[in-house]
Image: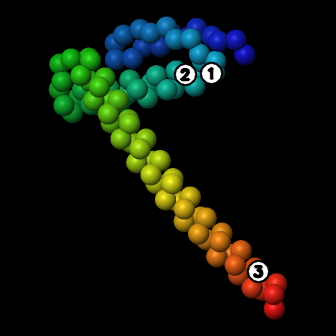
Amino acid sequence: MAPGRICVNIFGSEYHLISDDDEKYVKKVAQFVDDKMREIDKVQSINSPTRVAVMTALTVADELMQEQEYRNKLSEQLNEEAKKINQQIEEYLEE
């Protein structure tokens, strides 16, 4: 698919993006960012769009890193459980 030009509005500014992704998806991502920025601006009353953007980036990065850590722990637990199950199967087959 050829890259498409997509217009989004984030925190009162219009951006023209070029993306290979589906327009609906890009707009959903932009809406997520806009919502986060408005949420942070409402709670913290920072009178600078740049500072709101940085705080939003830090918040989203924190959420992402927490999710990655959770996924890594979950993956480790699943691997441990799979090892236990494989060990039980091997023991059963040896009987």
Q: Quadrant of the C terminus?
A: bottom right
For disc 3, the marked residue is 90
Quadrant position of residue 25: top right
**Badge 3: few (under 14), some or many (20 or more) residues near its Cα, within 10 Å?**
few
Whether tag 1 and tag 3 are in contact, CB under 8 A, the answer is: no
> Viewer-nearest of labels 1 and 3?
3
Of badges 2 and 3, the one in the foreground is 3
Vertical arrangement, residue 67 with respect to residue 17, above or below: below
Residue type for callout 2: Val
Residue drawn at x 27%, y 29% is 55
Q: Quick one: quadrant of the N terminus? A: top right
Q: Nearer the viewer, residue 19 or 87?
A: 87
Q: Amino acid at mark 1?
A: Asp
Q: Which mark is residue 53?
A: none
Disc 2 + disc 1, Cβ < 8 Å: yes
Mark 1 and mark 3: span between their CA atoms?
Answer: 46 Å
| Residue under pointer 1 | 21
Q: Give the camera-side residue of 40 and 93.
A: 93
